[in-house]
Each structure stands twice: as C-alpha cells, then as structure tokens.
Image (cartoon, grey):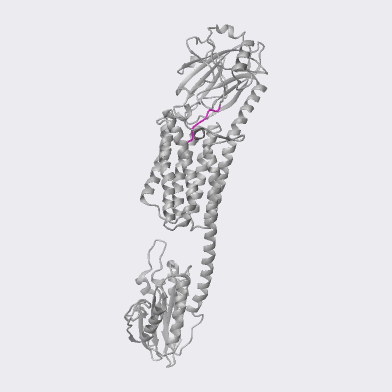
Amino acid sequence: MTKAPCSAVKTQFLPKSRLNVPRSLLVPLPGLICVLFVCVLSTPAYGAESGTWQDGSMSLKDGWRMHPGDDPAYSRSNYDDTAWSPVSLPQTHGIEAGRRWYRIRAKLPSSPSVLAIFVSGGAGTYEVFLNGEKVPGADLQTAWQVTGPRATSFGPLHAGGDVEIALRTFVPYSDLYRRDRGIWAVRVGTVASIATEVRSELGPRLGRAEPSVAINLLIAIAGLAVLTLFAAHRSHREYLWLGLYLLLSSVADGVWTLIDTGFIPLWVDCPANSAGYLGFAALVEFTFSFVRRRVSLGWRVYQFLLGIGALSTYLFYRGAQSLSAFDAELALLILPAAVLLPILLLVWYRRGNHEASWLIFPILLSCMTIVLYDSGWATSVLGWKLPRYLTESLEIGVVPLQVWDVANLLFIPAIGVVILLRFTRASREQANAAAEFGAAREIQRTLVPASLPAFPGYQIDAAYIPAAEVGGDLYQVIAKTDGSFLVVVGDVSGKGLKAAMSGAVAIGALRTLTAANLSPALLLEGLNRQITAGGHSGFITCLCVEIHPDGWSVFANAGHLSPYRNGEELDCGASLPLGLIKDADYREARIRLFPGDKLTLLTDGVVEARNSQGELFGFERTLAISSQSAQHIARTALEFGQDDDITVLTVMFES
C-alpha cells in the first residue's frame, strides 16, 4: 500500500550569505570564515565543509546556478550561466516537476589527480557533466524507472584546478517523487574518500530498510505457512484467504520500504500498491469464511471498489492525482473494512457465534492503522498539525520502524492465536468426526450382510459400494418358516452415525417382526410403528418382497424405488416412507415370477449417480441396464460418478 515518502538526505544546510561577495573571492577564501560559520550553525552531512578540500574530498553545496529547461548547450564548460538563479544543493524544500540544469565552478587541487564524484539523488533523475563531457554511469530515465535518493560514485576521473560540473536533472511528475526528492547532494574527492562516503550513506539506508523488510519477510513466511495449512485442510477456506492477505500486504509494505530507501525503481510500487488493495479484499473473504458465512452483495460491491482502487494507482503514478488525494482515497476505501467488519463481527458474536469475537482486535489493528496513517498524510494538505507517529517512522531504540510495521508486528501474534484456537477446535472436531465415522462404519456392517443364504430354485446376488461418507443403505434376505424368504432393501435418510444407528434399529425390528410370520404389508406397518415410537428423526424408504418357492411374490413398498423385472419397471404401488406417520397404511401387490425371470431391487445411489458435468444417471439409464447382473449395474453407476451409497440386489427364478 502507498506510504508517504521521506527524504533520504537528512542534511542541515547553511543559510546563504547576504554579502554581495564576488564569486572569484569565494575560491581563495574557503578557509577560516566558512569553517567557523559552518561549525557554529550546522553539522555537514558528508564530512568536510562546502568548498573545503579536507581529508581527500570536498562538498559542493553553495555556488550552484540553476535554470529550467533542457538545452544540451548548458553542459559546455564555457557556457555563460551568470543569468541563472543561484541555489544551494541539496535544496531545502521540494521543487516542481520537470527538467533543470545545475552548474558550478569548483577549484580542485592544482595538480591533476585521479578523482571521483559523489552524487546523492534518485537514480535516473540526473546526468553528470565534467568540463563539458558527460560522465559515464548516469542517465535520465522515465518517471517509472527512477529510484529514491541513493549515493553513487562516478569515476575515476582525471581533473585538477578549476573545473565545471553540471547536472542535467529530471523530477518526475508524480507527487510521490516530488516531495523532498527532487534534490541532489554532490561531493568531489579522491576515489578512496568518495568510496568511503558512498559506504557511509549506504549504512543508514540499510538501517532504515532492514527492520521493515525483515518484518514483512516474516509476514510473508507466515502467509506461506497458512497456505500450507490450507493445502492440508482444503475445507477450511479461511486459511486460503488469510494466507493471501498476509502475502499481499507483506509485498505492498516491503516493496514500499525498498522504494523509499532507493533500492528498487518507483514503478514497482504500482503493482505492489495494487496488491495492498487486493489484500484487503482477501481480508473480507477471510472474515466471512472464518465465521462460515457467505459474502453479501454489499461486500461484493466493496471488493469491486477495492479492485477499482488498485487500478487507480496507475493514474497516481502518471501524475494525474496528488499524494494527499491518493492517500485520502486509500483511507476512505479501507475505512469500511476498519469500521464495519469489527461491528459485523460483534453482531455475529451476540447472535451466538463466539469465534467471531476472536477477530475483532486483529481486524481493527490491521485496518485502522492504515486508515489513520493515510488520513494523516491526506489532511496534511490542510495544514493540520498531526501527531508525529501518523506520518513519520517510529524510533524504537535505534531501530526505525514505520507505524504499519509496528501494527503488522502485533497482528501476527494476534491472528496466530486466533488460528491456533480455530485449528485446535477443528482438529478436535475432525477427531470426533473420525471416531463417529468409524463407529458408523461398524454399525453399517450389520445393515449389509457379508454373505447371502441360498434357496432352492433361486439365485441371489448383491452388490454394495459405499460412498466416502457413511450412508444408510441396507438390505436383508431372511428365511421364513413356511419355506418362503423375505428380501428387504431400504435407505435411511441422512448420513453418518445417526443414519447408521437408525438403520440398525430398523434391522433389529425387522428380524423380530419376521419371526412372527407377518405379511409384507403388516411387517412394514409394524416397522413404522416401532420407528415412530422410538422418536428417531428422519425416515426410511423400504421395499419388502416375500418370495415363495413356486414363484409367487408379494410386494409392499414404503416410498422406495420400484423394482424391475426382466428390464421392465414393476408397478407395485407405493406408500409413505417409514417413520413419518404412526398409523400409515401399506398396500400389497402379488406378482408371479416364471422360470428365467430376474427381479432387480436397488437404492437411489444408482439413479442419482452424477458425473463431473452435474448430469444425473437417471431412470432411463437405470432401466436400460436393470436386467444386467448386480455387479454390472453397481459398477456402471460408480463409473458414471458416485454421489451416494450404491446398493443392487437381484433374484433369479431358475425353476
């Protein structure tokens, strides 16, 4: 996200003399007066005093002349610049955007020697000329390619005595760059002394950059850790959005620090600042995912506006928007996340979602810090006197930190505690679910017999393919005392342990009622009374068939799928599923099976199989394969796309 810039050259400057002293006298009088004047009023930024050759180098502060425009003739050593405006470098305030030339005549040691020039300024914003010749190593760049102020050494150069030094400069139109950045500091000296000056300047820049970069690197690592957590727990999408928020915000803040300290070009902040906007959109997703709620339309509109804000960054860097206006826009866009999200979390907490309260402090800390900071810079245009911490870095001991770095440093442990609590609860719920799943699987084994009994003249086959989640499919084949046998196929509503237990209760009641030698309709009535009296939630669909040795069969259907005979659907009537109404009536249908007839009973796991395009297997496909073997029907439904338990039972009347 965009941060207000700070000057990289913190220099105390000499006031210009009000005496009209000829310039020719300034060269032979660099000594005592200038030394005393400097010692009393200021401390120079780079060692020796302006115009004084000391310890192998000399600062060029006073004596510069400046003129706007860009004429190549301005670089010539004999060019008459007496009409130009006198200035000192570095300038004490920001200057307007555009191109300018600066020239100075300096007196170096009379004997030619190998020298170097030190310039502190944004790379790409200046070119250096010595005695009319361009010094290699510095070229003007576009507004996107320039950097923040940093020290650079140019040399070795062979010069001595009176020299002409000129700077051809360019200040980008972006308000971000112009604020205290269109200034340059220049020194000249031996190669060794200038190299020392460059190293001296690099140290403070690194000191300003390293703490912030380290903090944002830590945040990025935390983001990657959370994304790894999401990879292991795909159902918890809050981990995905939190990881993205941490990564995007660390990129935005870390990149700005590197730009502000002159290590990378200005253009990198355009995508990085956009990442900051998108990071807050991810924060909204994280908040709603954490409390397991869908993002409302209003918040979708807000996320869209954040995306528009990310695109507006380009206009700011083109100079079409001032820094204060840009910061005001950023503060206003983040304000809903900073104010409304905590209020919404509080409302959800009062409605019973206790986990919602965990996020209130981290969200406030993360969002409100940026709102206050950007509001501080935005209102500075009005001349308001704001607390220092709203617009400047904080000195914690000897470590300089931006206010958002401090907030991020506090955000990591705060959100870490939240994620730890959520992960602990999720792990506990997962362990309970695994235990329940295991128990349900054990119970389900009683619903589906491991082997089927044999009956003279009949061949019975069954296929059962459980889904990933425990369902309530059941089937039983039970011999009766009169020589007939009972075939029952059913499906308990719901999933998991509750459905499996309901099925087990039904199987127990079924075996008890079968011993009483009841007809299929009376058997279903008895089952229905026991299930409704037991207070079990949900219902059970059930198809009951009593098959006699001579092929006569009696059907009773409690809301289940119709059976098939020889590839045709049988209409045997249907009544309400078990467990809905205590006194439900069930009808019977008598159908004669002949040698070679095949009866097929199945559950809705076949009909409701669904492929990757969302298409159901359906009744037509089921009818087309209903005369096939139980294994073939089940395998066909599985390959189409299993959604539920698949149960198929076939009875072949052989003689």
Q: Is residue 652 visible?
A: yes
Nearest the viewer among 368 and 570 is 368
Residue 627, image x and y in percent?
39, 78
Total marks shown come to: 0
Residue at image position (61%, 24%) is: 153
* In magenta segment, residue 447: no
Q: Is residue 547 above or below residue 647?
A: below
Predominant secondary structure, magenta span: loop
Residue at the image point whose x is 58% and y is 6% from the top: 25
* Any part of residue 593 in sight: no
Q: Is residue 423 left or right of residue 502?
A: right
- Tell me the quarter of the picture where residue 556 sits: bottom left
In this picture, is 282 found above or below 323? below
Q: Is residue 298 above or below residue 150?
A: below
**Residue 251 point in image, percent of width and height:** 52, 41
Q: Which residues are magenta?
A: 2-8
User: Depth check: 451 or 300 in front?
Assistant: 300
Residue 418 x/y as whole percent? 52, 53
